[in-house]
Amino acid sequence: MRQSVRPHRVWSWLGIMAGLGWTAARVSVPAIAGAAINQINGHGGHSLAFWVMVLLLAGVFQAIFTGLRRYAAFRLALRVETDLRMRLVAHLERLHFAFHDEAQTGQLMANANSDIMQVQNVVLLIPLTIASTLTMGAVIVLLVLRSPGLALFALGALPLLQISATLFSRRMFPIGLAQQDALAAYSGVVEESITGVRVVKGFGSEARQVARLDVEAERVYERSIAAAKLRAWFLPLIDLLPAMGLVGILWFGGHQVLTGHLNDGDIVAANFYVLMLIWPLRMLGMLLGQIPRAVAAAGRIHDVLITEPRIANAAHPVALPADGPGELRFEAVRFGYRRSAHPVLDGLDLVIDGGEAVALVGATASGKSTVARLVPRFYDVDAGVIRIDGVDVRDADLHEVRRAVGIVFEDTFLFTQSVRENIAFADPEAPLERVRWAARLAGADQFISDLPDGYETLVGQHGYTLSGGQRQRIAIARAVLADPRVLILDDATSSVDPSKEHEIRAALGEVMQGRTTLIIAHRPATIALADRVVLLDGGRVVVSGTHDELLRTNAAYRAVLARAEVDEITGITELNATAGD
Amino acid sequence: MRGQGHWSELLPEETLSRDEAQRVLRRLWRMLKPYYRSIFVATVLVVLQAAALLGGPALVGYAINNGLPHKHFKGDVGVLDRSVVAYLVLAFAGFVLGRLVTMRIARIGEDYLRMLRATLFRHLMGLSMGFFEREQTGRLVSRMTSDIDALQELISQGLVLMVQNVLLFVGAVIVIFVLSWQLALGVIVIVPPVYFASRWFRRVSNEAYLAVRDRIAVNMSTLQESLEGIRVVQAFAREGEYTQKFHGTNEDQYQANLRTVKISARYFPAVEFTGVLGTAVILGFGGFLVHRNLILIGTVAAFVLYLNNLFEPIQQLSQFYNVVQSAGAALQKVFNLLDTHASVVERPGAFDLPSGSLGIDVDHVSFSYTTDGETVLHDVNLSIAPGERVALVGPTGAGKSTLAKLMARFYDPVEGTVRVGGCDLRDVMLSSLHRRLCVVPQEGYLFAGSLRENVRIGRVTATDADIERALHALGLYERFAAFPEGIDTEVREGGSRLSAGERQLVSLARAALADPDILVLDEATSNLDPGTEHAVERALETLMVGRTVVVVAHRLSTAARADRIAVIDDGGLAELGTHDELVHAGGRYAALYESWVTRR
Ligand SMILES: Nc1ncnc2c1ncn2[C@@H]1O[C@H](COP(=O)(O)OP(=O)(O)OP(=O)(O)O)[C@@H](O)[C@H]1O
Ligand SMILES: Nc1ncnc2c1ncn2[C@@H]1O[C@H](COP(=O)(O)OP(=O)(O)OP(=O)(O)O)[C@@H](O)[C@H]1O
Ligand SMILES: [Mg+2]
Ligand SMILES: [Mg+2]
């Protein structure tokens, strides 16, 4: 935090200086008022008009300085907040997939929003508190000079105010946390019920969700009441304690006046001072209470900031050979996700020549998507090497690798942008012709033109609802437009209907010209796009060959594609087809 | 994956018109009916508390005037001491009353919020599928969360303070006029400037504050989207651009914030100066009145103390304006949601489906999603016998999923009837239908939690043994038990720790656990390898023997296994028959199948 404040030291000094001026003007007001009262009461001195003018002058100074000090303090705090958020976000953008797999978006959002606010609050309170502390010191000195006894009665109760404010904030901290937890659990139920409403409705489990929500709403209620109980002690107390000071002044001061030791003006001035101290003391209490919260928040932010991106650029990146054919080579690759007991991939060897198209076939959860994710270095292998055109991907420039590899994920993510911007993601400057070209190759041009605003139609989370097949095709177009030397299609045709498959196949054939392509698919028609098929099983490539070869010779391959059974059903048709020839 | 979308929902921040605000408040007041008694008691307490707070300065003035010496008066210890004791009593009474007020208001408010949360959610869960398909997840979530939170702020603090401040202000005005009307008239002079400054501040700061909310919403939704799409961003090496984009929105947020600071850096000096001005007026004019023997010095002292009670309320009230404004806007959105009626409702006297095997009759059904939109289905007739297995195939956008949704009564047909087990779905109890009929969609949403809990969605009352039995029945138990934490593995939101196929297997296990009489699979196996798909389907078949199954599939190998195949094209039933019949008939299906098998 100190580090974030340093570049803006000017503002913190300005804030403190203005705070000093403000303090001086402010504490002079009661003194002047007291003098004026004494004058009214016939104790002589300067004329009343004089005191009134002095008072107004002090008012002017107070006004100027309060504006300055507020401006300086807020400006500093906002600057720190903004910079810190920028640092955090820039860091998050660079963090590796494995981090994002485990992190929850909601949590990261909270880091960037409420956690940073907590830190901001403290930064804001510091200069304000410095001014407040000065005010307090000045008031104490002035009152003691006037009458030590009066000072004792006036201010005796006030430390209690600060103590109880601190105590309140401290006690409130865990209760507030518990309240936040309850609210988070509550909104968790809301979010999943709404996001998963298809499932909830499909299984008729509305009643269960309602019951769960009632439990969470009840918990929110209980915790809020607990917070209210604490508030119900504190809020009246901050009215009571200064009132005790005023009572003390009246009693002690009154008797002193009766015995002729003090004047009425002293009582009024002391009253004034007490009222003046209420806010600074509360503020100090708030700050003391805020600090543990801010420390916890800063800790959470720090945890993210010290997480080193696990996938980072090599110190001296090797350039990929220009115009390389895109040869892709897996050598004895081993990889496992953090939590899995066995590696997902173990001893994977595979060479895909430049320009070759290979279909990767394997059972559910055999690790096909994992293979796909290793190529653009979303994760690093545990052992072995992956090379593109002979260069270990870990030695190459990360961005260069990722630009060289275009991937279509199995679950499509589209941004809340126009169709055009989504397709032109890799190159926002791309002219519309090029975007249309990519869309055409992905078999998407037709339906996009039929959308309400054509290529400018907003899609994504908050946009026009596209069918699964249409979304997939936009994602394919996005990868095509990037013009990568290696193209990876991870089950990218699962929602495409068979009648469209022809078109897409023809178009994809064109895309794959001169590129290395890795196709993950379950459908024969898509597999047929490839020059060669490899079967993934037990974390390694077990067999390689053409689709027909493998169907004939390999039982495991037949099992994955369920050919044995299909043959039974299609037996008749095929007989007919042969008979007709 | 989760519906964090409510950030962008904050965007179009509308201010309520006076009329709307009144309507919303009136409705809120009606909803508070059960609490009227409690609110009355609270109001009495608040009035008493304000009186206790206002009594203090008057006592100080009284003690100075009648207890302390001035000019020809020597002072009276008795009056002084009695005043001190009275003040002490008032202060403690104020404390006790304050506690009571805070607690009572909190109970009313929190109780109301709990009721609102529960009512709103019940209402929401009762709304039809059509509503959820139209609305954005994020918006609905924010109705239940941030909008209610905005109310909470108003209820837990705003209301008491507002009432209290009004009372304090009015009370202080009355008291100072009683003490000395001449001086009171003098002091009142400072009220207009404060009032107008506060009004200016309210207006300008409200705009600035809305702008801040707006910028925060933009900034946070930018961040949210780049986090949700982080894999795509990194895959296309566009982190730099996204960081840059965020830099822009982040600085916008800073500028908007800075504007509010500039406004208050103008307002607060004015207010503080007016405060000193007020003191000056009291002393100058009060001194003049004292010299004229119109008032006593203690009255001047009391006025100085009351000045605070004139100022703070005006200031505080103008700050509450923001709270009230956003709470009003939030409340209006909540009410609008409560006013949305479910389009699919259970009619009174709806009955249970008959027991035993159920068939489905789609009888001259036409349907469109919107009243003026194009017809998605026209005049579809399809009879599915109890225990039959029918596949729906056809091109994208033909209406297959729509037909499946009509069978589950997610929507009602515009024309025609859907009957299950011979009963018009509109006469059937929804709970009964959903117990007997399950739809498994392609994207079977996984909730954060263990695999086991995710399967349990299928039937809430299922025991652990039931769940394991269902997994065994589909041949999935070994697969999931092999995970390090077995079927208690935490799957994370959206099931991000599982492969795409594994997620679909979990959905299928839910269906097996639910064990319905009719099962509708809408591309529920599209990510499975054909081998696994086939094995799971076989298992389901055995499990569901004698039950009715409707499958929507793009893979013809899946469709081919059905008893009959219905080809849906352009919203109508194009062909219907067994696989062999359709292949022999040489129509659309035959052509599709032709291309499917020659590519094997
Ligand atoms: N919630 C909705 N609101 C408005 N229109 C919709 C909605 N859902 C679907 N549609 C439209 O209705 C038509 C039929 O859609 P449906 O989802 O039934 O197609 P489908 O045959 O299942 O296609 P696919 O093979 O892509 O799943 C499409 O034109 C689609 O755009
Ligand atoms: N982010 C992750 N964290 C932990 N485990 C994972 C993660 N992603 C996948 N796994 C596990 O790794 C294994 C391989 O997953 P992968 O997604 O590569 O399978 P797949 O072959 O693509 O399967 P599918 O055909 O179902 O998509 C699975 O058992 C899966 O549960
Ligand atoms: Mg996969
Ligand atoms: Mg569909």
Image: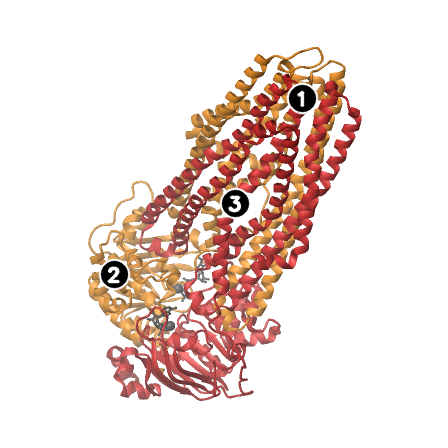
Chain colours: A red, B orange
Q: Which residue is mark 3?
A: A288
Answer with left or right where residue B63 lies relative to residue A353: right
Q: In 3D space, how far apart are the residues under numbered discs 1 and 3 (Cα atoms)?
A: 37 Å
The answer to whether dots 1 and 2 both sit on one chain is no
Residue B371 position (above or below residue B188) = below
Q: Position of residue B88 (x, y in %)?
A: 52, 22
Q: Nearer the viewer, residue B141 or B405?
A: B141
Q: Quadrant of the C terminus of chain B?
A: bottom left
For disc 1, the chain is A
Q: Which residue is mark 2?
A: B512
Q: Residue at x 46, y 57 (%)?
A: A107
The answer to whether dots 2 and 3 both sit on one chain is no
* Camera-nearest label, 2 or 3: 3
* Camera-nearest label, 1 or 2: 1
What amino acid is found at the position of numbered circle 3 in the picture?
Answer: Leu
Q: Which mark is residue A264?
A: 1
Q: Residue at x 49, y 47 (%)?
A: B146
